[in-house]
Structure formats: structure tokens, C-alpha cells
Amino acid sequence: MESRKLLKSGEFLVSSIDAADIFIPEEFSEEQKMIAQTCSDFLETEVMPKMNDLEKCDRELMKTILKKSGELGMLGISIPEEYGGFGQDFITQMLVAETTGAGASFSVAFMAHCGIGTLPVLYYGNEDQRQRYVTRLATGELLGAYCLTEPGAGSDANAGKTSAKLSDDGKNYIINGQKMWITNAGFADTLVVFAKIDNDRVLSAFIIETGYPGVVIGPDEHKMGIKGSSTAQIYFNEVKVPVENLLGKRGEGFRIALNILHMGRIKLGANVLGAAKKTINDSVRYANERKQFGVLISSFGAIKHKLAEQVIRLYASESAVYRVSRDINELMNKYKSECGDKERASIDAISHYAVEAAILKVAGSEMLDLVVDEAVQIYGGMGYSAEMDVERTYRDSRINRIFEGTNEINRLLVSDTAMKRAMKGDFDLFGEAEKLFINIDNLNDGRTAGETYHQEKKRYLDNFKKLILICIHGSMKQFAKGLMHEQEVMNNIANMMMETYLSESLALRVEKLEARRGEVSVFRDILDVNIWETACLFRKEATDAICSFASPESLSSLARTAEELTRVGFVNSKDARRRIADKLIEDNSYKF
């Protein structure tokens, strides 16, 4: 395998990579495409025809469909062969997450089982636990769920009150407590449950079978969306759990929970891609059929704007998803070669990219919300009718901004985690930021004569990164340790970081695509509009941050710098969007 540059999590702020060093979806192998097609065919034949029944929260039907997917091997994609799975690499796992994302409520149940319901046992279980549980979870013989949230412990997971005490004979832990918002609760066979042993400050994790006496499953919640997924409270009343079902070490539960959330965030970033692609397909097909004023509505500029915006936002998110997927895959291989426990090495590699995980979660969920909102608008009154898929997709989408940690929590994680990684010495963020701040009066947009198209875009992105560093330095200088309490400023920085990562991933993808195919103008249109919009967003976010931390003496200089570093070439975004929309309209589906 050729040697590629591998950036650490958050290091994109101070380093660049070549287009050749990223993975793009156009590079999927035939085997990967076949696996994705199998998943797509399963949705088409086994899931979508039964969607109306699933929406009535038919627990047994969902259980049956999940088990059928297990018979096809879909539940074992990420499970090593020695535990009954297919042992596919991380990029393939993400492709499966994307493909199944088009499956509405089924996707939620499927991802909960394959991810948080199974992987904690694979990654943190001992060999006995893996043989007893993972081998059966991989095939669908057992179905899994994950129990972290409690009535008084949501974002603050460590505030949970569920307790565990060792029995007098030392053979069991006695579990008491309550968990809520548990996906797959209605039919799960195994639960990964977090509780505090005795007076421990932090959580421990346990594998609990729902058949144990004292486990009580509540009725399914009535929800805004994802109605087909089983979501219920689970009560633990003096439940005896064998000591050999302690997952990981005592007190390791909080670490397990955090690392599994990183994994969940990254895979959610892929999952929403599938939902977005289906919704864009629904949007353009309806626009190509619906007539008003005697013409197809797809001919209207206002509709083309919406269709193009759907494509641009999706294409950028997709580029970022597979860029980091390749990074994680290579870090997994590196860790596995160094570590005796290959499964623990896998979760360590995923957890390393905590900054990017939070970016993908926030950007992806908000991208999908935009896509489905515009879809309902394109459908007009019919979009508000329950007869149409877009009505359900609109409701289903909303949970993604709450799943796997709210977007508010994740925005803070983006900026805070990057700074903490830099403080640990992973990359020199603060040194580079100080150099820029010292030289701030001499900064300009760096434009040079004779730039190529891609050199120009790289310069813009480098300027965006410089502005982020200036805002980090200035805010830390003003607020010091109190910066974490200035959540609005942290959000300004996070928003700039997210847009930079997405735009850079998009730019690298277009450059690599052109190296493979030659110039394809519509992809340049996507990039041009994206950079133009990003520059406008940057100018506002940076100025808001600067006005929060700058002294009266430095305000005008910093504001001028923000203007200088967000200066980009003018773009006829109307015509560019029309060309993007015209391709979508001609293809009558998303083929970007």
C-alpha cells in the first residue's frame, strides 16, 4: 500500500494534505458497491413495502426484519470473522451506514443494534463475552440495545443514579435503576447498561439479558418521528447480573460510553447521507412531474435553487465523511499492528478522531434537516400530507440533532477538543496562532499572480484556518480558563472549524476527481458556491467572536483582518446553482 499522510484529529487546522492523500466515494471497489447494493435491495424488498406497518410501532415486525437482515449478513459487517461476521474495513462499514440510512425507522433500529448495541461488547468485552454474545449479535440470533440515558442524566451521562452492589456471595451485581429513550428496548435480548458500583464517582458497564428477573420493559414512547423504532424506558429492580458480565474494568464505563458515542457520531454522519440522497431523489422526481402555470416546476429558478442547495450541502458532507473514514481505517491498521487486542485498537482509532466525529454529526444532521425541509417545500401542500415519504422523512430527521449528544454539546466538543488536543502536544495550534496574532497588521489575502484554480481554493482555505487561529488566540487571551463558559464564542469557532473541514474535504475531492477524469465543470460549480457561502459565514462568525473578545484598541485591526482573510473571488452563484440543478433534473436522481 502506498504511504499516505495521516493527520491527527483536529490537525487540519494547522496542516494541509494533498488531494492524493484522501479517499473519495468514486474509489469504492466493486466488492464495496456489491455490499451496498445488497443493503439497498433489502430496503427495497423487505423494509419499504412494510413501512406503514412499521410506523404503527409493530415490535415483532421490526424484530423479524432485523433478523432477516442478520441472515443476509448485514448485522455482521463490522464484526471480525472469528466472531461470526464479515470483518469489513471501516470505509465499508460507513458505506453500509450510508446505504441503510434511506430506511427510515428501520435504519434507527439497525444502526442501534449494529453499533451501540453490539460494538461495546466487541471492543471492550473479554474473549468469553465476545464468544457468548458477539457471535450471536452478529447473526441476529440476539438483538442488542444500549442503556445510558436516565431521567436526570442526559448530556451529563455521569450523573446517572442506576446502582450496582456486589451480592454477599460475590457472584452477582445487584442492579437497581431506570433508563430512558432506549432504542430497540421493546425486543432487545441484550443490554449494555451503565451503573455506578457502590459509591464510585464514575460509571461501570454491564451486559444484562432482558430475560433476567427484575428487568421490566415499559411501553413504547409516542414520538414525533422514527415511529417504527421501539423506544421505551427500562427498569431494573434488584436484577442479579453475574460478575462475569461486568464489561471492561470497574469504573471504565464512562470511558466506554464516551468512546462509543464518538463511534455513533461518525456513523450517524454517514447514515444521514442515505436519507438525504433518497430525499433529493424524491424532490427532483416530483419537480419533474408537477406542473404549475402550464410548465414543470423543475423549470422555475426558485425550485432550481432549492435542488442545487440540497446537492451542494450533501456533496460536501459526503466528502468529509469518506475523508475521515479513510483516516480512521489507516489508524486502525496501525494500532492493530502495535496492539495485542485488535478490537480495543479499533475503538481507540475511532475515538482518536473525536473532533471530526462531532463535526460530521452536527454538519450531517443539519444538512439533512435542510434537505428534508426544502423537499417538503418543493412538494408544497402534498409535502404536508402523510401520503408522501417526505412528510415522514421530515419528522424522522429532527431526532438526529439530539441523538449521540445534542448539536449544542457537539459544537462545544469541536472547539474544546481541538484545543485540548493541541495542549497535549498533538499539533502546534497555539504557536501558529501566536505568530499570526503578532503579525496581524501585515496579514493580507495572500493572492499571487498565476494561481491555478485549485491553488486559489487552497489559499482561501488556508486563510480561513488563519482566521480560526486568530480567534482562538484572541479569545483565550481575553477569557483564559473562562473561555469554556463563553459558549457563544466557542460556537463561533466551532462553526468556522466545521465549515473549513467540509469545504477542504470538498475541494480535495474535486481536485482528486479531476486528476482521475479531467475537469468536470459541475463539480467546480459545487465547490465555487460552497467556498463563496463559507466565506460569507466566516465573515459573520469571526466578526461576532472578535467583537466579543477584542479591546477597543484592537477591534478595528482585527475586523479588517477578518475582512481580508475572507476575501474570495466573486461567483455567479445563480448560474452555478442552475447548472447543478440542471444536471440533477436531467438525471432525475442524485448522480454526483
Image (cartoon, grey):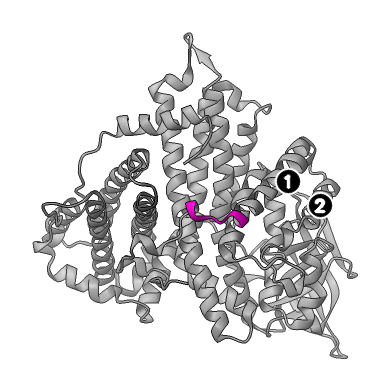
The spot of residue 516 in percent (x, y) is: 39, 52
Indicate yes or no whether the magenta region holds residue 30. Answer: yes
Residue type at mark 1: give it.
Phe
Q: Pick the residue in front: 524 or 309.
A: 524
> Which quarter of the figure has residue 536?
top left
The spot of residue 402 in percent (x, y) is: 57, 53
Q: Is residue 476 visible?
A: yes
Q: Which residues are magenta?
A: 26-31
> Which quarter of the figure has residue 481?
bottom left
Marks 1/2: CA distance? 9 Å
Q: Pick the residue in front: 150 or 118.
A: 118
Instruction: Tell me: residue 241, above or below residue 20.
Output: below
User: Would you name the residue on which mark 2 appears?
Assistant: 68
Direction from residue 178 to residue 25 in the image, left or right = left
Direction from residue 15 to residue 24 in the image, left or right = right
Q: How many marks?
A: 2
Q: Which mark is residue 42?
A: 1
Q: Secondary structure at mark 1?
A: helix
